[in-house]
Image (spheres, rainbow, N blue to C red):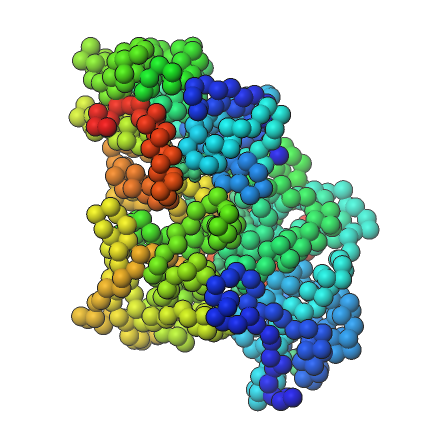
Amino acid sequence: MDVLKKVPVREQDAKERATNFAEVCLGYNKEEAMEEATRCINCKNAQCIKGCPVAINIPGFIEQVKNGDMEKAYQVISESSALPAVCGRVCPQESQCEGKCIKGIKGEPISIGKLERFVADWARENGIKPEGAKEKKGKKVAVIGSGPAGLTCAGDLAKMGYDVTIFEALHEAGGVLVYGIPEFRLPKEEVVAKEIENVKSLGVKIETNVVIGKSTTIDELMDEEGFDAVFIGSGAGLPKFMGIPGENANGVFSANEYLTRSNLMKAFDEKSNTPIMRGKKVAVVGGGNVAMDAARTALRLGAEVHIVYRRSEEELPARVEEVHHAKEEGIIFDLLTNPTEILSDEKGWVTGMTCIRMELGEPDDSGRRRPVEIPGSAFTMDVDTVIMALGTSPNPLISSTTDGLETNKWKCIVADEANGKTTKEGVYAGGDAVTGAATVILAMGAGKAAAKGIDEYLSGR
Amino acid sequence: MYKIMKKQELAANIYLMDVEAKRVAKSCQPGQFVIVRMDADGERIPLTICDYNRETGAVTIVFQTVGAATKMMADLKVGDYFHDFVGPLGCASEFVKEDLESLKQKKMLFVAGGVGAAPVYPQVKWLHEHGIQADVIVGSKTKDLLILEKEMEAVAGNLYVTTDDGSYGRSGMVTQVIKDLIAEGKKYDVCVAIGPMIMMKFVCLLTKEYELPTIVSLNPIMVDGTGMCGACRVTVGGKVKFACVDGPEFDGHAVNFDEAMRRQSLYKTQEGKAILALEEGDTHHGGCGNC
Ligand SMILES: Cc1cc2nc3c(=O)[nH]c(=O)nc-3n(C[C@H](O)[C@H](O)[C@H](O)COP(=O)(O)OP(=O)(O)OC[C@H]3O[C@@H](n4cnc5c(N)ncnc54)[C@H](O)[C@@H]3O)c2cc1C
Ligand SMILES: Cc1cc2nc3c(=O)[nH]c(=O)nc-3n(C[C@H](O)[C@H](O)[C@H](O)COP(=O)(O)OP(=O)(O)OC[C@H]3O[C@@H](n4cnc5c(N)ncnc54)[C@H](O)[C@@H]3O)c2cc1C
Ligand code: SF4
Ligand code: SF4
Ligand code: FES
């Protein structure tokens, strides 16, 4: 064993997985996990913990893995995280925990994410569940949205003894975990549904098909339905479009629509009633996780797929692992390329996309070098489907129907980072609804902080 | 789960159902819609709210069988359940928010084509309950496909029924009736037209000539109905709007109908096309003068 390298993780073969929706990464088995754990030197002043937004006691749980005591390892993780099977799979570890790991200086960092995933999967398979509250507080809290922020906040509050109800607009709970991130990265039945079952087993009620701001309002929940506090975890679901000519042609979709059809509505399955466009040649515009997910979904539906991104590979915001997997599967990367128009035939169907080549200029506000057009470099890609994955922003449905709830210029709800407090008494918020599109673990961290904030507020009364 | 309290076949392939959905019944307004799912792996189907009872918690929907999902829905019986029933979605009709006194000064004309009578009904009823009598034109292809006539009669100021084939009421498309009424000297301040896209398009072309402001209710393809997917985007006055949150009602004179109709056909598979051709034949009750 090369101590400088991670124990390799088993994956589905790239050629094979390009034609199915089963999970790409197969994860460690017990032996592999224990072997990887021995690489961790149990640092006194562990840097990895500083890289984890919820500060999991990483050396602590890895120590238990080393000893083969997976149940204890799970307990250590559970102190800080409610969705380890999810985070182990989707956290951008390279820029968080693993990015800070001391072993990464001379070799490869400890495979923290894969170990966390192993422990969580083991606990699930062995029927280990988080413990519920011993005593009830007799107070009601409403949680809006069932994504990672809402689930975490609800779970924590239930553990403290609050009577919690989650209100979810869609027909299924899970937020982006069910409608956005595809099956091949995050299995819905085995992983997400089970994590939601865990939250329910703590006594949390989930009422689906309730759109807060339409079906009822925050004020009604507090004044008429007797909720003592509210947590808003409604995410950042509004898709952006480029505003270029031809964007309403038949065959142009937001990544949200495309992924929702495939993930939530199971359109990838021929038996599903929900249709999805099975293009021959697909361009996905954007370079984040959402773009990778849309691209790899289109590939699995049989298309030749191009990622069109206006900056260079270095700036791709997606997780490194996703970019790597996408390339292995045969996604073509057209970098430093920006679309300018979508072309369509006389019936309005997409026939191509005009693009212009870019080069990197001076750094912009984000510190990344600004892409600038190369004059005279326009060309046309012949594609029949275009998927826009340009980022999302919070839905104004709630903020526009709740008096006294302040938002900033990006329509994000203004909330205190430490405890989730908003400008409206008794109302807390966190996750993408506050930060704009971010990550699962940050949303979870915000849900946790808000649960604490709500507890302080309700016990102070 | 949402219980079906009542079911009625209004005409061939057009059904009315009362569904128990307390939250929706409590907060809905005319102009809004719901999305329903029959079972755990059902399609999400948007349907306009046709009536509601705040006391019993019942919401009335009227639907026409178009494709696989609506056909299966037609087989549901009283006592069965919808798996999902979410709403109310979209914005309420503008007049609901208007000052009642100034609204009373206005003369309103409603134009309903086919199943469009269902969404028109709660609006006319609301006005009636607030002491405002609106004129209503209801068009259908033929007598057998006419729906909600009695209900409409009870709440409308004047009701003008027309059939394309002249089998009942007046004869001809709804556009002809608009022309006739205006020729008879009727004056209107606002027109609300709801029906198949093509009908709304031609009503708008006509009312533009009369400079009669016209509101239409668009029914593009939708997925979530909350602004999350963008499937429902339509162009109104050169701007992209999401029908599910910005609408479904828009200024008809500003709507790009050709694009909207094109986008509606996005998932028309060969089979879907055949079903539609078969049945839209029936609903092309009105007004376009072209087909
Ligand atoms: C395709 C895709 C891939 C991603 N990949 C990764 C990844 O690999 N790693 C990573 O860390 N992050 C990833 N992210 C980002 C991550 O998923 C989000 O940051 C995270 O889910 C945010 O959690 P949240 O709880 O704030 O909101 P969400 O997960 O968005 O959940 C919000 C929930 O609230 C509901 N809701 C909204 N409005 C209302 C309302 N008015 N009433 C009731 N309910 C409402 C929504 O339906 C939704 O279920 C990805 C995102 C997408 C879209
Ligand atoms: C806001 C809104 C309100 C609506 N109100 C009503 C109503 O009150 N009563 C009613 O009968 N219908 C209404 N519709 C239309 C109704 O939703 C469609 O007829 C239904 O979704 C078709 O479903 P299906 O599965 O049976 O057919 P599918 O098998 O899905 O489709 C059959 C064909 O219809 C096309 N189609 C799919 N969705 C739509 C759509 N939204 N509009 C038009 N064609 C579509 C498909 O492309 C397909 O070719 C409304 C639609 C919207 C968006
Ligand atoms: S939650 Fe994410 S960042 Fe924290 S240790 Fe686990 S994988 Fe790393
Ligand atoms: S920094 Fe790396 S080696 Fe040190 S405790 Fe954390 S995971 Fe182990
Ligand atoms: S239906 Fe998805 S945004 Fe309107």
Question: Which residue: 33% across, 19% down?
Answer: B140
Please say whether residue B269 is visible from this viewpoint: yes
Tell me which corner region of the image, top left, top right, bottom left or bottom right, holds residue B92: top left
Q: Name, please, the residue furthest toward the right.
A: A134
* Image: A24 above or below A41: above
* Image: A88 above or below A280: below
Quadrant in the picture for the N terminus of chain B: top right
Counting every numbered tag in the picture gives 0
Q: On the rendered structure, is A165 left or right of B15? A: right
Q: On the rendered structure, is A152 left or right of B181? A: right
* Image: A399 above or below B75: below
Please provide percent x and percent y for residue A37: 69, 79
Quadrant in the picture for the C terminus of chain B: top left
Question: Which residue: 55% across, 53% down?
Answer: A178
Please provide percent x and percent y for residue A368: 38, 73
Tell me which corner region of the image, top left, top right, bottom left or bottom right, holds residue B174: top left
Question: Which residue: 58% across, 84% down?
Answer: A108
Please provide percent x and percent y for residue B65: 44, 30
Q: Nearer the viewer, residue A64 or B190?
A: A64
Question: Which residue: 37% across, 70% down?
Answer: A332
Q: Nearer the viewer, residue A232 or A257?
A: A257
Q: Nearer the viewer, residue B33 or A432?
A: B33
Please provide percent x and percent y for residue B56: 60, 21
Please say whether residue A217 is visible from this viewpoint: no
